[in-house]
Amino acid sequence: MDLRRWGSEYEKQYIQLTEQDIEKVALNYHNWQQTDYKTTYKDVPEFCKSASFEDTVANDFSLVPSKYIEFVDKDSQIDFETEMKRIQKEFTTLLKEEKDSQNQLINAFKTLGYEL
């Protein structure tokens, strides 16, 4: 349950949850509240964790979520060499297109009798 994949973005920095998203959050919370929560609830990386009293003692009673919730390092899964070659190819194409556009603009001005 990665909340960043839920809802819809607005004002570039916020996520607005849909009714379905809210229902998923509520269901997860209610499952956690059950007597048999060990069968109905599960921790979800980057979303939630059921921390025990011992966990909070070990973290000096801090309630900062990042001390408990597992975060996935998505950057470590990127093949740097492959990604750089992809970016290089894309950038080379963009530079060629820019040069072509510049030449077309220069020729358009020449056709009108003006030099750039």
Image (spheres, grey):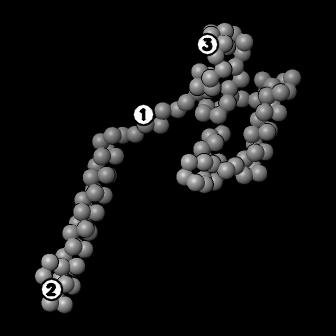
**Horizontal and vertical percent for residue 13?**
56, 48
Q: Earlier in the sequence, mark 3 or mark 2?
A: 3
Quadrant showing the C terminus:
bottom left
Q: Which residue is mark 2?
A: 114
Label 2, secondary structure: give it.
loop
Give above or below for 65 relative to 80: above
Single out the mark in the foreground, 1 or 3.
Answer: 3
Pointer 2: residues within 10 angstroms few (<14), some, or many (20+)?
Answer: few
Frontmost residue, 110 versus 77: 110
Left or right of residue 82: residue 28: right
Frontmost residue, 61 versus 77: 61
- Callout 3–callout 2 Cβ contact below 8 Å: no
The amino acid on which the numbered mark 2 sits, given as a three-letter code, is: Tyr
The quarter holding residue 52 reads top right
Give above or below for 107 relative to 64: below
Q: Residue at x 52, y 32 (%)?
A: 72
Q: Which residue is mark 1?
A: 76
Give above or below for 53 relative to 80: above
Give above or below for 90 relative to 85: below
Label 3, secondary structure: give it.
loop
Frontmost residue, 102 versus 19: 102
Q: Which residue is mark 3?
A: 59
**Horizontal and vertical percent for residue 67?**
59, 21
Q: Residue at x 80, y 38 (%)?
A: 27
The amino acid on which the numbered mark 1 sits, given as a three-letter code, is: Ser
Residue 52 shows in this picture:
yes
Residue 40 shows in this picture:
no
Pointer 3: residues within 10 angstroms few (<14), some, or many (20+)?
Answer: few
Left or right of residue 23: residue 95: left
Mark 1 vs mark 3, CA separation in Å: 26 Å
